[in-house]
Image (cartoon, rainbow, N blue to C red):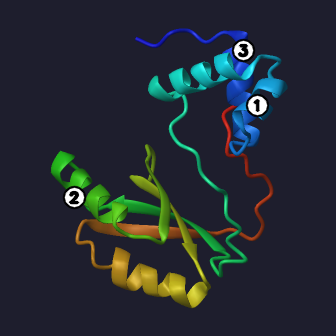
């Protein structure tokens, strides 16, 4: 059972979402506390699963992964065994950076990063194409990333 968060916990989470690289002292200054209680609160938030992990947000353009594609996947049929097998395969494909099981016309929404259209085509033909359960795919190519927010609205 999760303990309810107080105003200070929320401030800590908001501040860390903006910059997880802050030292404990910098975080304490930002939320108007001393370092020891901030450290203890941060560790508690980690233990309780409010903070899942800390990551660096990389620039895909600089790393030659500038093509962003949302790929909608419809399976031929779906049950627990087929869905589990599909998700296990997707977890091993590095080009897929996110995968969501969705409702509606498609079963899964994949967020895919590639160098260019040729690499994406190769991904579709050799990686998605090798999954027997895939019935159809529809690709949506991102022309411009207008808003990208990695945080949760608190």
Residue farthest along the bottom direction in this orientation: 118
Marker disc for residue 25: 1
Marker disc for residue 85: 2
N-terminal of the pair, mark 1 or mark 2, is 1
Marker disc for residue 8: 3
Element class at badge 1: helix
Of marks 1 and 2, the one in the foreground:
1
Quarter placement of the C terminus? top right
Element class at badge 3: helix
Above or below for 66 versus 49: below
Residue at x 66% of width, y 34% of height = 152
Q: Nearer the viewer, residue 153 or 84?
A: 153
N-terminal of the pair, mark 2 or mark 3, is 3
Q: How many marks?
A: 3
- Quick one: label 1, few (<14), some, or many (20+) residues within 10 Å? some
Q: Is residue 81 left or right of residue 101?
A: left
Marker disc for residue 145: none
Q: Disc 2 to disc 3, how far (Cα)?
A: 43 Å
Above or below for 12 versus 78: above
* Quadrant of the rendered image containing residue 137: bottom left
Q: Disc 1 to disc 3, how far (Cα)?
A: 15 Å
- Quick one: label 2, few (<14), some, or many (20+) residues within 10 Å? few
Q: Nearer the viewer, residue 3 or 117?
A: 3
- Quick one: label 3, few (<14), some, or many (20+) residues within 10 Å? some
Q: Are marks 2 and 3 in contact (CB under 8 Å)?
A: no
Residue at x 69% of width, y 20% of height = 10
Element class at badge 2: helix
N-terminal of the pair, mark 1 or mark 3, is 3
Residue 133 horizontal/vertical position (percent): 24, 66
């Amino acid at each position: 059972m999760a303990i309810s968060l107080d105003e200070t916990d929320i401030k800590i989470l908001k501040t860390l979402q903006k910059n997880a690289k802050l030292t404990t002292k910098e975080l304490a200054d930002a939320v108007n506390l001393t370092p020891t209680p901030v450290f203890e609160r941060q560790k508690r938030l980690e233990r309780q699963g409010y903070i899942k992990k800390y990551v660096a947000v990389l620039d895909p353009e600089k790393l030659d992964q500038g093509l962003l594609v949302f790929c909608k996947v419809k399976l031929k049929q779906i049950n627990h065994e087929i869905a589990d097998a599909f998700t296990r395969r997707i977890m091993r494909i590095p080009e897929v950076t996110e995968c969501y099981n969705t409702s509606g016309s498609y079963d899964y929404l994949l967020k895919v990063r590639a160098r260019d259209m040729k690499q994406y085509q190769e991904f579709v033909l050799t990686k998605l194409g090798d999954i027997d359960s895939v019935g159809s795919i529809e690709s949506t190519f991102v022309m411009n990333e207008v808003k990208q927010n990695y945080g949760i609205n608190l």
